[in-house]
């Protein structure tokens, strides 16, 4: 029986299956999706000409068909690079806040519109880019 996956309903399924993907499944060595040849890890660079930034990556490259793939860590690095590019081009949400002082520490309050999905268990990772520039990453 051939299933039409576009119209698939729960009752059409014969049994429940569970799939687990090993955490190291995408670390390599990888096989090329296009030709099936083993891929090798090589250094590559991506330049963002509008902001004069070049970032070096390690990519998986097929020696036969020249396809290139990023693993999960390198893809995160590229995402971060693209976020910085938007910041430098001033294409991101921007707000100005007063810096507060409680007698011991300086702190900044985030607007309620930004924090509506936050909970009390979140953490902030703060990376100093200079003495006055910081990158703040909020995570669970």
Image (tube, grey):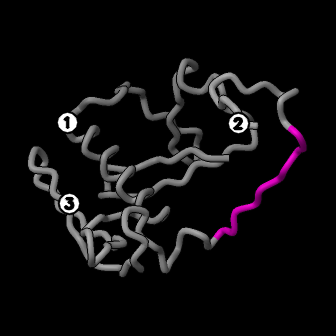
Q: Is mark 2 on a helix, strand or loop?
A: loop
For image coordinates 31% across by 73% down, the residue present is 61
Q: Nearer the viewer, mark 2 or mark 1?
A: 2
Residue 11, x across and y down, in percent: 88, 27
Q: Is the magenta stretch mostly helix, strand or loop?
A: loop
Residue at the extreme front = 1
Residue 2 circle label? 2
For marks 3 and 2, the one nearer the N-term is: 2
For image coordinates 26% across by 69% down, the residue present is 65
The answer to whether 135 appears left or right of 25 in the picture is left
Query: Circle 3 sits on which residue?
Result: 46
The answer to whether 96 appears left or right of 72 in the picture is left
Sort mark 2 into few (<14), some (14-19) or many (20+) by Cα contacts within 10 Å: few
Residue 37's quadrant in the figure? bottom left
For image coordinates 49% across by 80% down, the residue present is 29
In magenta, the rendered stretch is: 14-23
Q: How far apart are marks 1 and 3 (CA)?
A: 17 Å
Q: Is residue 129 magenta?
A: no
Sort mark 3 into few (<14), some (14-19) or many (20+) by Cα contacts within 10 Å: few
For image coordinates 66% across by 31% down, the residue present is 5
The answer to whether residue 11 is above or below residue 43 is above
Residue 16, x across and y down, in percent: 88, 45
The answer to whether residue 74 is above or below residue 101 is below
Query: Circle 1 sits on which residue?
Result: 89
The answer to whether residue 102 is above or below residue 6 is below
């Amino acid at each position: 029986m051939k299933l039409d996956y576009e119209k698939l309903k729960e009752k059409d399924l014969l049994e429940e299956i569970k799939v687990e993907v090993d955490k190291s499944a995408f670390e390599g060595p990888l096989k090329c999706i296009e030709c099936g040849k083993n891929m090798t890890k090589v250094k590559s660079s991506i330049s963002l000409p509008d902001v004069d930034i070049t970032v070096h990556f390690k990519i998986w490259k097929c020696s036969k068909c020249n396809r290139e793939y990023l693993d999960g860590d390198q893809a995160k690095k590229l995402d971060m690079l693209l976020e910085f590019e938007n910041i430098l081009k001033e294409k991101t949400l921007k707000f100005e806040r007063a810096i507060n002082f409680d007698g011991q520490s300086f702190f900044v309050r985030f607007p309620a519109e930004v924090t509506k999905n936050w909970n009390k268990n979140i953490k902030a990772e703060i990376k100093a880019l200079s003495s006055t520039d910081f990158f703040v990453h909020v995570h669970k």
